[in-house]
Image (cartoon, rainbow, N blue to C red):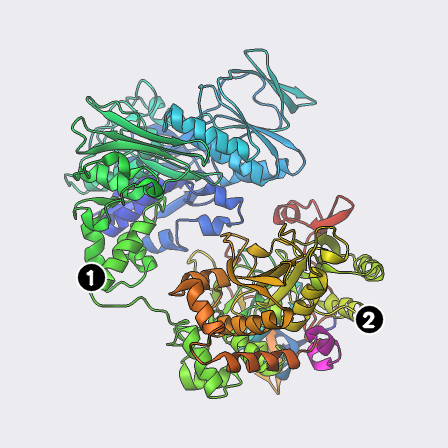
Amino acid sequence: MTAIALELDGAPWEDVCALEDIVPWTGVCALIAGRQVAIVRTGDAVYALGNLDPFSKANVLSRGIVGDKDGIPKIASPIFKQTFDLRTGQCLDNPAVRVPTHEVRIERGRILVHREPRPGDQDGA
Amino acid sequence: MTKKQLVVVGNGMVGHRFLELLLESGESERWNVVTFCEEPRLAYDRVNLTNFLGGKSPAELSLVGPRRYEDAGVTVHLGDRAAVIDRQCKRVLSAEGRRIPYDVLVLATGSAPFVPPIPGRDAWGCFVYRTIDDLKRIRLWAAQIQTGVVIGGGLLGLEAANALTHMGLETHVVEFAPRLMAMQIDEGGAQILRSKIEALGVSVHTGKNTTRIVSRGGRVTEIRFADGGVLAAEMVVFSAGISARDELARNAGLEVGERGGIVVDERCRTSDPDILAIGECASYRGRTYGLVGPGYQMARTAVSTLAGGDDRLGVFDMSTKLKLMGVEVASFGDAHGTLPGARVVAFSDAVSGVYKKLVLSSDRQRLLGGVLVGEASSYGQLLSLTQSKAALPPQPEQLILPRLEGGAALPGVDALPDAATICTCQNVGKGVICKAIRSQDLTSVGAVKAATTAGTGCGSCVPLLGELLAREMKRAGKKVSRDLCEHFPHPRQELFHLLRVHGVRSFDELIGKHGRGTGCEICKPAVASMLSSTWNEHVLEDRHLGLQDTNDRFLANIQRDGSYSVVPRVPGGEITPDQLIALGWIARKHCLYSKITGAQRVDLFGARLEQLPQIWRDLVAAGFESGHAYGKALRTVKSCVGSTWCRFGVQDSVSFAIRLENRYKGLRAPHKLKSAVSGCARECAEAQGKDFGVIATEKGYNLYLCGNGGMKPQHAQLFATDLDEDTLIRYLDRFLMFYVRTADRLQRTAAWFNNLEGGIEYLRQVLIDDSLGICAELESDMARIVDSYRCEWKATIEDPVKLARFRTFVNSPEPDPSLVRVPQRAQHRPATWEEKQLHLVPQEAE
């Protein structure tokens, strides 16, 4: 792995790329502590969520189309088009399904992603 | 007030429905609710279990929302089984040693597959078909074998046989009775059903008494019949019916029925008034009920009984409609004509495989029941006519005769009284649905389903819901919305016009001026397509990148595991030996699975994201261009070999196909476009099944438009005859641009044509006679697209910024470790999720 792990506030954050490496309204995938994490940029925010699409079981969420539903920022799986709330990982088409999310911060133009998913987030499938 | 303790044993569809109704009723305030769920997952949609094999995940089949029970205060013992009921002490002992006291106990233990006592039935490779875990086991076993046998030719047996054929097995169905689905349909229907199923490649063996299952090394090898017959089998699936799981009640001394099932009264009470039973485990009026409709009714009644209400079980409707292996089968009311005085009219057409029977009252005024096989679109209405006892038209047999022979139209939903049941699964009547549409201002079938629960069971009433909705909306003077999506209050055609007229060149500009919000997966690709077919800029420009579906975004076709396939253009299907060799070299170099497509091209599968640029460098170096298989764009112009070689050919179809393909390649459209050119009337290129097809004549070419293969085949319409090449191309320029401008998103030319008022004659007026005065504009628009064509892949590999996006991980050069391959027939395929989970192949990173 080539990424650098930084220690900030005692919490393990990973510097994954520069903000400008992600074209607005698209996503990329980062490998963080062995997990595939989709890093998604909207117009003014960056979100991180599990890259595994629970419906197709393919690691593809980062390649979906980004937009909103009634103002909720979301990404659509490129395989079967289910959509997920970028903030919570909640699937907007099936209340029983949720993907894990990670905290993100932007510092000096770099995107830092927390190495662990938010507590309580598990595989929804 | 201290709460009383309610224990529910079983969390299947009915147990779950009971809990939902209890929670909704407010009655749950009075109870501490505890439930046992023997399976490792909460209630799921067992009716549509087969969808699990079609790719639905257990989460999608689940009926229980996340934290639904926790939030409602219901305690669930998942994976634990109630083992003993101690009626003396009023408590339940579980397999894991729990002791749960109850004030009231509800048994919803369901049923178990009935496995006939055939010697050898325990061999490896013998399965039942009931749970998600059963299906997982069947699927894994099926992957190693070729032949499967289903014992049981009833409804469940045929479902299982369907599943086996989907897994690619040579499938046999063995039935003890002399016909298939003996419970639901009659001899006439069964004959048609059998011939249709056999035509699908399933072997049907009726009147067969299986006496022995033979195994070698523990694995099943064949089954033997009483008549001396033998059938080779590597797998046996028992689907010969179900038996109520009444053992818990039986051991507790509760009364059980002669033919099994816990005896309940019309309020779902067992012989112990503190114990209720519901669903498949309950025996009411001397029998058990294996359908979900009666189970749900029992759940309702049981909640009422708990609350001191007066709801009582009535007569259960055992009507069913289902689609077995693509064959519709329905049975309703008194399907076998057993009521006194019942008269039968039947219609049978062995050629088209349709059988319909109506059972009428002796005065022919009322419908009592019927059977439909092969075509059951009228099921919902016939069932409603049966249940509402509405008066029939004078010649009721006309209801089932084909319309061409003078059959009468079915009375519409208007003819049904408000009391008529529309959804028998959820017991929702017409009046309730119409009232909900009116009072809650519902505007979609989905909203009607959510508001009334109608249509959420078997789904066969959904077309009726659509009719009711359309009627109510019309009555209220409302129109069904054709807006593109929530972000654009315009249909696609209007947006296209705005984009052209105002010279809009980006999504941001369009949504800023004519939309709201930030867009979604519906409007973004639609706008990307419109921008491309107007301005033809590269789809991977920064401002267009986020609009593209993943296929366009990576200029390749995504596959089920997230890898991609690559299809280079082979215009007209003409390919040199050197190009073929190059394709072989490139496929071998990058380890790609190779397959010939239906469009005379070669598809190379299994490319990882980061491999695509090098694969395309190699392809471009060998002279190939992008085939646009990933785009809603022109795919291919297929051709037969034509007059250059063929002794029948009258024109050079290959040359013309290549000319057409090179002209329209890269054109983005509302949906994909396919084409073909045949060199004579023998039509070897199948041009009449294409969006635009050309068939050579002695004098030139005939042009056919708006055909379709695929899901809904439709023959193309003859548009003009004996054209020369240049005239034909002029008409095509106009036709394609007219379609691009006016079709809905994802609307193929055939569907677009079907919605054009005036049909082919109208198209001729617009495109030949120029009745709208737009032909010059359409031609110049097309000329601009043709002139600005560049191979997207060639442009991409020359642009380092675009190339940099073709990587799996933004922070690592590693390939995706979850892409795992399994050898198959000298090539390979993606490993399945189960294979990865069961460590049959190297494990992925997570």
Question: Is residue B343 visible to the viewer in this orientation of the structure?
Answer: yes
- On the rendered structure, is B185 left or right of B610? left
Query: What amino acid type should be assigned to the residue bearing mark 1?
Result: Arg
Secondary structure at numbered mark 1: helix
User: Can you tell which quarter of the image residue B275 is in?
Assistant: top left
Q: Of all residues shown, which one is farthest toward the top? A: B227
- For disc 1, the marked residue is B438
Q: Residues within 10 Å of mark 2 (few under 14, many from 20)?
A: few
Subunit ID for the residue under disc 1: B
Query: What amino acid type should be assigned to the residue bearing mark 2?
Result: Ala
Q: Which mark is residue A2?
A: none
**Residue at point 34% right, 38% down?**
B292
Q: Give whichever of A53, B191 is nearer the camera.
A: B191
Q: Give whichever of B323, B408 is nearer the camera.
A: B408
Q: Main secondary structure of the magenta part?
A: helix
Where is residue B405 drawn, in percent x and y? 33, 40
**Residue at point 31% right, 45% down?**
B19
- For disc 2, the marked residue is B621
Residue B184 among those drawn in magenta: no
Q: Earlier in the sequence, mark 2 or mark 1?
A: 1
Secondary structure at numbered mark 2: helix
Asked if residue B49 is positioned above or below residue B765 in the image, the reply reads above
Where is residue B762 drawn, in percent x and y? 42, 68
The magenta segment is B791-802
- On the rendered structure, is B395 left or right of A92? left
